[in-house]
Image (spheres, rainbow, N blue to C red):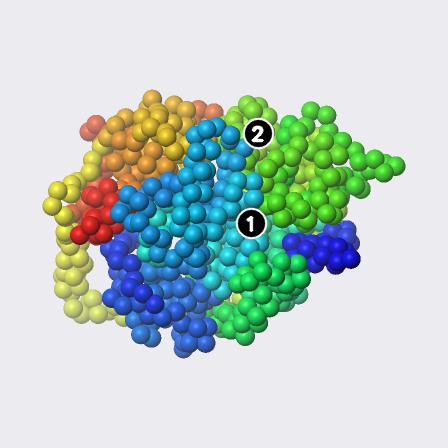
Amino acid sequence: MFAPVRRSLALAASRGGRQVLLSARSQRPLSIPRVRTAAYSTTPRLRQEAFHSQLENAAPLPSAKSSSTQTPQTLTEKIVQRYSVGLAPGKTVKSGDYVTLAPHHCMTHDNSWPVAMKFMSIGASKIHDNRQVVMTLDHDVQNKSEANLKKYRQIEEFAGKHGVDFYPAGRGIGHQIMVEEGYAWPGTVTVASDSHSNMYGGVGCLGTPMVRTDAASIWATGRTWWQIPPIAKVTLTGILPPGVTGKDVIVALCGLFNNDDVLNHAIEFTGSEETLRSISIDDRLAIANMTTEWGALSGLFPIDSVLQQWLRAKATTAAMFNPEAAKGKFTHEKIDDLINNQLRADPGATYAKSLYLNLSTLSPFVAGPNSVKVATPLKDLEAQDIKLNKAYLVSCTNSRASDIAAAANVFREAAKDGVIPKVADGVKFYIAAASTLEQAAAEEAGDWQVLLAAGAEPLPAGCGPCIGLGTGLLEPGEVGISASNRNFKGRMGSTDAKAYLASPEVVAASALKGKIAGPGWYQKPEGVEKVIIGEGNGDVVQDKAISIEEALDKLIAQADSMIASAEKEFTGDEAVAEPAAAEEETLTEILPGFPEKIEGEIVFCDADNINTDGIYPGKYTYQDNVTTEKMAEVCMENYDKEFGQVAKEGDILVSGFNFGCGSSREQAATAILAKKIPLVVSGSFGNIFSRNSINNALMGVEVPRLVQRLRETFKADGEGNKVLTRRTGWKLVWDVRRSKVIVTEGEGGQQWSQKVGELPPNVQEIIARGGLEKWVKSQIEA
């Protein structure tokens, strides 16, 4: 009797409103040394002493009302304020602050056993708060080898022993579970040992990635350290046209703002009520998920009426059909409390930058090949007649019931006499739901069956091809299109294959037609000729006012400079220069036994955005028995197969900008250490790689000038002759005591030096101990 009602409520909850569009067309803070990650940079940043806000006794978590202060805060800062412990009385957290975080929840997946090994190795025997921890098995679920099954048993037994919520292989992707089971709750901080934790921002939860060592720390103590990133505001204007999805929004953002505009930032999406009503929860989840690929550390949507309606639908469904299991998760009482204590950014809050995108001017976009920074309008690729071998409707990004419905509708509309057409000859179409609940909703709607009738090959709910594991990987020379989040070279199979990313309907239409194509659903608004993007809020009047304010600030700064110059003339050059000279000679304390200098020959990998898949291939990431020798052998393999032969022990690895972007795998740092390379230098680092480096005792320093000089000297004779890994003959010395690098450009060549950030004694101690895990153990044993 309740079946129709149940189905409509379940679909409303799972699809978050997209089906409408489809049918129309108090404890002691963790004692960690004051780590200053800014010490690795030679470029201007917000600088301060790390963990200055930590006190001996933790402050209770403030309520939404008590956390309001006179200092305007962003939504990100307000949420962090709630979950920071040990703050000084009256302390208002802001971007740049180091805090001790006690996250609402911490999720680990297939890496739960390596985390457990770290947890036990530091001497911990009891999880601090087993309600804080969630374990899901999702990455290598197709692997039925005894080694993998043994690891899965060990994780399940460990979770059972400690009373931790556990979800077995086949139940779904961890991030989807965190959302659909209510762990990623709006207004909370929820972390996971996976780079796509950003996805929780789609439901107003500040999700951000942690690494395995951090997860072990949270298990043992309930908390870890975090620096509040610079915060970028992204204003969305207009409304999504028919045929344009959340996937198109984030693909366009990644491709159009592709100069590291939001690298290592926390993003807050905002817009008018009308604009935000056009973006369903499922679309928000897809957008937030891929803010990771955009380079951000979080992607937060507001807690608005769209989210409240989604939550109400979930709570109603739970109350009607599974009231016992729903207790403490989706309840109307919790939603009432959320609304009554709603968090939102304060007027006048400070943002590091502001960008905008007019959704009304957007059309379907496709990312690739092999890069999310290359985004092309679908119509341009359709004209190129790009033949396909494989298509994928998989991953936590776009494999929910609404996505499966969109793909199924492509085949329904192409049906003749009620017969569902088949996938194009020579094309394999793989489908895997984000979770069993999403698959059940798709089956109840008949959408799953439509795709099976079209010849799609089902896979278990899990990561699978997206992470390069299991059935259906791309072979050399093949071309694939996927609704997943990451198309780095080699991630989904062979490094000699090409991978594109698109929305579920474009993936389905491409599988049907055998080439990159759309379903023809896009309706171009009248007068739209190009995508409108830019800096600011997208409001001409408001942006003009901001520009005037910035111009006034610039004039004031120029006046201050003129006054300083006049004072200098009166006081004399020597008197003014003396403090600068004294600062130049400031020496860093070196711990006993720590090397004062690190030196070696530069081996240059001339590329920006070398990601963690390029550094350490995903196919090895969840093999826990990989030897150090094997790690050294495969280090940088997906970037350059010749790296292992070119690079030698003791070399200093130099690369371009945003080195180590991508996933949270710690092996990206430990593989370089296995290669016996003690130091990595780059123009800039991905934040999560920097965190992994500190936690695993790999040293790194940012020297943009060195990258520039190497590129000026070793220019390729055309793109085809570019040397991926080059022995340069240059020498680099990092003088740790004097915080500078000295570069000698070849035998008898030019020598120059550059000041770099300080490597303070507290970070030296972590490195000297062999990483944060061993440092924590030493503190427990002390």
Q: Residue at x 33, y 41 (%)?
A: 117
Q: Residue at x 59, y 37 (%)?
A: 460
**Left or right: where 317 falls relative to 138:** right
The furthest residue to the left: 592
Label 1 CA crowd tier, 10 Å (few <14, some 14–19, many 20+): many
* Residue type of the residue flagged with mark 2: Thr
Residue highlighted by disc 1 = 176
Residue 423: percent from the left, percent from the top? Answer: 73, 31
- Which sits in the foreground, 44 or 398? 398
Residue highlighted by disc 2 = 471
Quadrant that contains the N terminus: bottom right
Q: Give the number of callouts.
A: 2
**Left or right: where 575 falls relative to 630:** left
Q: Secondary structure at mark 2?
A: loop
* Residue type of the residue flagged with mark 1: Gln
Decide if residue 259 is in sight here: no
**Left or right: where 221 falls relative to 741:** right
> How far, Cα to Cα, is label 1 from label 2?
21 Å
Q: Residue at x 42, y 57 (%)?
A: 132
